Amino acid sequence: MNFHIEYELEEDGRWLAEVPELPGVMAYGASADEAMSRAEVLAERVSAEEPAAI
């Protein structure tokens, strides 16, 4: 499943990635790729638990 992931560099140097269509699905990482990967895994878990959320 594909998700729209937004990401940004925080002031403390960590990257934050979130899936806007799934409230609360966000993850930090040391790199943009790591944060996006973590957010994608979390989004897949959330969507598997609540199919009506998407």
Image (cartoon, rainbow, N blue to C red):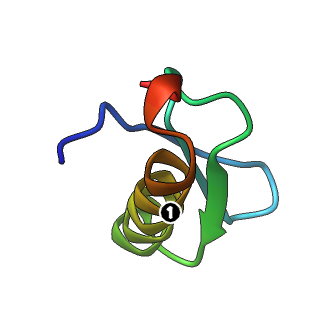
Instruction: Note whether 13 is above or below 21 in the view shown.
Output: below
Say whether residue 3 is left or right of residue 53: left
Q: Quadrant of the C terminus?
A: top left
The location of residue 3, given as percent across then percent down, is 29, 38
Q: Based on the displayed image, in which of its 4 quarters is residue 12 positioned?
A: bottom right
Say whether residue 12 is left or right of residue 5: right
Say whether residue 23 is left or right of residue 19: right
Figure label count:
1
Q: Residue at x 31, y 31 (%)?
A: 4
Element class at badge 1: helix
Q: Out of 37 and 23, give the one closest to the viewer.
A: 23
Q: Out of 39 and 46, give the one closest to the viewer.
A: 46
Q: Based on the displayed image, in which of its 4 quarters is residue 8 positioned?
A: top right
Q: Residue at x 65, y 49 (%)?
A: 26
Instruction: Note whether 42 is above or below 22 in the view shown.
Output: below
Q: Out of 46 and 29, give the one closest to the viewer.
A: 46
Mark 1, residue position: 45
Q: Residues within 10 Å of mark 1 (few under 14, many from 20)?
A: few
The location of residue 49, given as percent across then percent down, is 56, 54
Residue furthest right in the image:
12
Q: Residue at x 43, y 75 (%)?
A: 34
Instruction: Note whether 53 is above or below 32 in the view shown.
Output: above
Q: Residue at x 68, y 28 (%)?
A: 23
Q: Amino acid at mark 1?
A: Arg
The location of residue 50, given as percent across then percent down, is 55, 41
Instruction: Note whether 16 is above or below 30 in the view shown.
Output: above
The location of residue 52, given as percent across then percent down, is 48, 25
